[in-house]
Amino acid sequence: TQLLEQSPQFLSIQEGENLTVYCNSSSVFSSLQWYRQEPGEGPVLLVTVVTGGEVKKLKRLTFQFGDARKDSSLHITAAQPGDTGLYLCAGEYTGGFKTIFGAGTRLFVKA
Amino acid sequence: DAGVIQSPRHEVTEMGQEVTLRCKPISGHDYLFWYRQTMMRGLELLIYFNNNVPIDDSGMPEDRFSAKMPNASFSTLKIQPSEPRDSAVYFCASSHSGTGYNEQFFGPGTRLTVL
């Protein structure tokens, strides 16, 4: 079974702190997506990374794809209460549209 | 666009009853996915369709689960008979192959409780 492991599983921080969430696998992915899910809603796409070593920024969020396209990280600078949610990474298998999701990192930012 | 539409939003039923969940994907999207989310197992892919044809149903847990996509704008996930362990949030998502990547748009989910 191919797995996508996320760490940490849970993170509770104060507003203004920085944090990094990791997504790791032994599999190579053709692309990797990050989603954020809020309670009672479906996941919402944040970004797609495709090229090994790629870095993408979305305001205070920085996403990086590993050189071997097996892992990724999400760094949030100066976290705000609005960043609270479940962050999910999803790896897309090569040759198809099938995607596997990690278990997620549940982030809580305290004001 | 209204986004992915799912109904009902909440379903409470008794063990043994048939449950049908419905999904309307975003117009123009050619891929449709059904997922189940629980605290214990996270987000699990059950089945996905491409151009209304089932491509991979290896995630469907048992024969009690079935899914259909009679046309490009409608899909159903049926559980018959339902069991308490089927209680979960079921999501439908759609995507468009034209982007080259599986960037999925999720519906709001159906929270199923089987008593």
Image (cartoon, coloured by chain):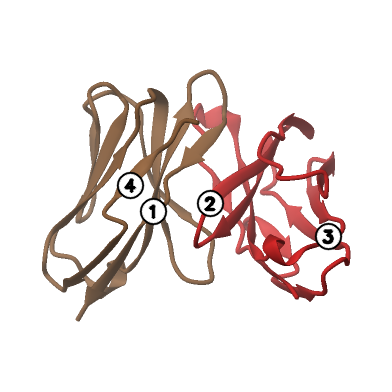
Q: Residue at x 65, y 55 (%)?
A: B4
Do dots 4 and 3 share one subunit?
Answer: no
Give the quadrant of the C terminus of chain A. Answer: bottom left
- Earlier along the polypeptide chain: callout 3 or callout 2? 3
Q: Secondary structure at mark 2?
A: strand
- Letter of the chain shown red in the rendering: B
Residue type at tag 4 = Gln
Above or below for B78 versus B89 = above
- Letter of the chain shown brown in the rendering: A
Given residues A68 and A10, the one toward you in this image is A10
Q: Position of residue A69 (x, y in %)?
A: 31, 25
Above or below for A7 versus A42 = above
Is residue A25 toward the left or the right of residue A3 in the image? Answer: left
Q: Secondary structure at mark 4?
A: strand
Residue denoted by label 4: A6
Residue denoted by label 3: B20
Q: Secondary structure at mark 1?
A: loop
User: For residue A38, what is the image quadrant?
Assistant: bottom left
Mark 1 chain:
A
- Separation of residues labelled 4 and 1 (CA atoms): 6 Å
Residue denoted by label 1: A104
Do dots 3 and 2 share one subunit?
Answer: yes
Given residues B103 and B43, the one toward you in this image is B43
Mark 4 chain:
A
Is residue B70 toward the left or the right of residue B26 in the image? Answer: right
- Separation of residues labelled 4 and 3 (CA atoms): 32 Å
Mark 3 chain:
B
**Mark 1: few, some, or many residues within 10 Å (few <14, many ≥20)?**
many
**Mark 4: few, some, or many residues within 10 Å (few <14, many ≥20)?**
many
* In contact (CB < 8 Å): disc 2 and disc 1: yes
Q: Residue at x 60, y 64 (%)?
A: B108
